[in-house]
Image (cartoon, helix red, strand yellow):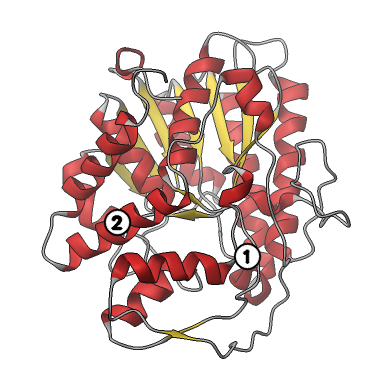
Amino acid sequence: MLPDQQFWKGKKVLVTGHTGFTGAWLSIWLSQIGAKILGISLGPNTSPSLFGLCEQDIGLESLLCDVRNYGDLVDPFQSFSPDVVFHLAAQSLVVDGYRNPRETIATNVMGTCNILDLVRTFPSARAVVAVTTDKVYKPCVASRPHAEEDRLGGPDPYSASKGAAELLISSYADSFFADTDVSVVSVRAGNIIGGGDWAEARIIPDALRSWVAREPLQLRRPNAVRPWQHVLEPVAAYIGLAESIWSAKPINRAYNIGPQAEDSVSVLELVKLAATAFGDRANINTEVASSDFAENTLLTLDSSLISEDYGYKQRWPIEAAINATVAWYKGFYEGGNPYELCLADIASFSDVGSKTS
């Protein structure tokens, strides 16, 4: 699922959460293929941030406001009249869900409600892609990948808020958009890696911070298995889904986006791959760090539904994703232009299997 540049040229696209890691990558790619972008989000929550480093090159209209405040969203939404909406704005960390559950729920549930209600109240958008998370699922007793029909109900506040958002998305689609030209789909993406992420409590940013400082990396849950994938995998799928549902209702309401089974590896396996790519200064402390918060040990995704419905295929296996991620950071710390590093990754990613994809 790669973008059709002709489709996006001149399209008015609203991206919420554009200052976040995934939102910045999405905005970079959309801008490159000719979309006119309005970004709505709080400011970046890390320093540096990918958006902060690339904002001038992206060339989008950026509005810093809180998606929880409906009144602040009405005028810019109505004035811009987006053709396509990508809703990514969220409190996106499990740890912060424990620290600030009310804020997490307000942002992830009411923020989603506000965006959907703007689409309902001020008709212009024909395609809405709402991003949730792979953690919406209630943990399985059986050790199998989660499929879209599995029960929702992650055990922590962050996961619960995203599960509630899924119900809300489905409700709005049924109640308000079923007999209209508006198509709405939710996407549950696996754990993402890639250059330009400096968030707290994410394994690759933690690793790079440690190794650049010549310090050992300490792991919290080395045996936890996650569906790791490069951020460009879901970003490409979001763009491709928006194109597909522009002219026809989605075949299904929600889709997983995750890697092949063999690429859902443990934290320790992932870090070892990253250490190999980074080189001699990469040091891993094998003593497990303590954690005050519970998380699932095993989480994998079944992405066969989006493959069957829209031909989605993973483009970068885990080693390629890790190598691209580490190379991005190396390039950045050696003085490379972060925007150009992103464009190079997009080009490389797009070239994979170009004769058959």
Mark pair 1, 2: CA separation: 24 Å
Badge 2: how crowded within 10 Å, few (<14), some, or many (20+)?
many
Q: Position of residue 295 (x, y in %)?
A: 71, 70
- Identify whether 241 is placed above or below 115: above
Q: Residue at x 62, y 58 (%)?
A: 226
Q: Give me the disc on residue 103.
A: 1
Q: Residue at x 26, y 57 (%)?
A: 328
- Identify whether 290 is placed above or below 102: below
Taking depth in this image into account, of 308 and 57 the one nearest to the observer is 308
Q: Position of residue 297 (x, y in %)?
A: 72, 67
Q: Is residue 217 left or right of residue 255?
A: left
Q: Earlier in the sequence, mark 1 or mark 2?
A: 2
Q: Secondary structure at mark 2?
A: helix
Taking depth in this image into account, of 136 and 256 the one nearest to the observer is 256
Amino acid type for the residue under numbered disc 1: Glu
Q: Residue at x 82, y 36 (%)?
A: 149
Q: Is residue 174 left or right of residue 205?
A: right
Taking depth in this image into account, of 297 and 99 the one nearest to the observer is 297
- Identify whether 171 is placed above or below 219: above
Q: Position of residue 156 (x, y in %)?
A: 75, 66
Q: Residue at x 68, y 17 (%)?
A: 251
Q: On the image, numbered disc 2 is attached to which residue?
A: 50
Observer able to see residue 199? no
Pointers 1 and 2 in contact (CB under 8 A)? Answer: no
Amino acid type for the residue under numbered disc 2: Leu
Q: Position of residue 168 (x, y in %)?
A: 74, 39
